[in-house]
Amino acid sequence: MHSRTYVPALAATLTAAVSLFGGPAYAQADAPVDQPLAARVVTYDAGASAEFRGAVDRGAAIWNESVDNVELRPVAAGQRADIRVLADNGWPRALTTSLGRGTVYMGRQAVNEGYDTVRIAAHELGHILGLPDRKPGPCSSLMSGSSAGVPCTNPYPNAAEKAEVEGDFGAALARPSATAPRQVMTVD
């Protein structure tokens, strides 16, 4: 896994703030300045994803391998998940209510047409993590979705997609209000 985001500029910012308000020219914190920020944990419930359970777990694991500022975890028993994953007979889609929250539909229609289930799961989770569709697009772009064609089985986000998720969740870690509710329906 990548190293977590560090905040080495924090000491300089604190020193400047303390100096502006007439305090000493240094600031001391309880934790070291280079202490990593904890990743935002986003839970998912794949209990209603039927035959797609393994694909959903693998799609979440791929995101966990790919980014540092967010971690997807299965929800604990008795807890409410940030992401619900459901199986249905339609086309795969995601309904995002806010960054890191929403519902993923693992639609059998795309699977019946030959699309890869792990790519579908990673793609739809990508929407919940804030990424839009990028169609048409090459197979190397996870968010190109179905426009990459049935032969494309790549479930990994490219560098730009990883950077966008890192940036969105890095900002959310710094400013919790950055996750204000919004509704976005994405049908792939």
Image: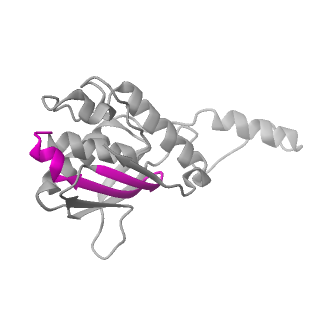
Q: In the rendered view, would you say 153 is above or below 78?
A: above
Residue 114 drawn in magenta? yes
Q: Position of residue 70 (x, y in %)?
A: 41, 46
Q: Which residues are magenta?
A: 93-115
Q: In the rendered view, would you say 173 is above or below 74?
A: above
In the image, 21: left or right of 56? right
Which residue is at the far right? Answer: 22
* Colour mapping used in the image: one colour
Q: Position of residue 73 (x, y in %)?
A: 30, 56
Residue 114 visible to the viewer: yes
Task: Tell me which corner region of the image, top left, top right, bottom left or bottom right, holds residue 144.
Answer: top left
Q: In the rendered view, would you say 1 is above or below 159?
A: below
> In which quadrant is the C terminus drawn?
top left
Q: Position of residue 57 (x, y in %)?
A: 20, 52
Q: Residue at x 49, y 55 (%)?
A: 183
Q: Residue at x 25, y 40 (%)?
A: 62
Q: Nearer the viewer, residue 152 or 33?
A: 152
> In which quadrant is the N terminus drawn?
top left
Task: Tell me which corner region of the image, top left, top right, bottom left or bottom right, holds residue 21.
Answer: top right
Q: Position of residue 147 (x, y in %)?
A: 26, 30
Q: Nearer the viewer, residue 5 or 136?
A: 136
Residue 26 visible to the viewer: no
Q: In the rendered view, would you say 143 is above or below 21?
A: above
In the image, 47: left or right of 8? left
Q: Residue at x 31, y 76 (%)?
A: 78
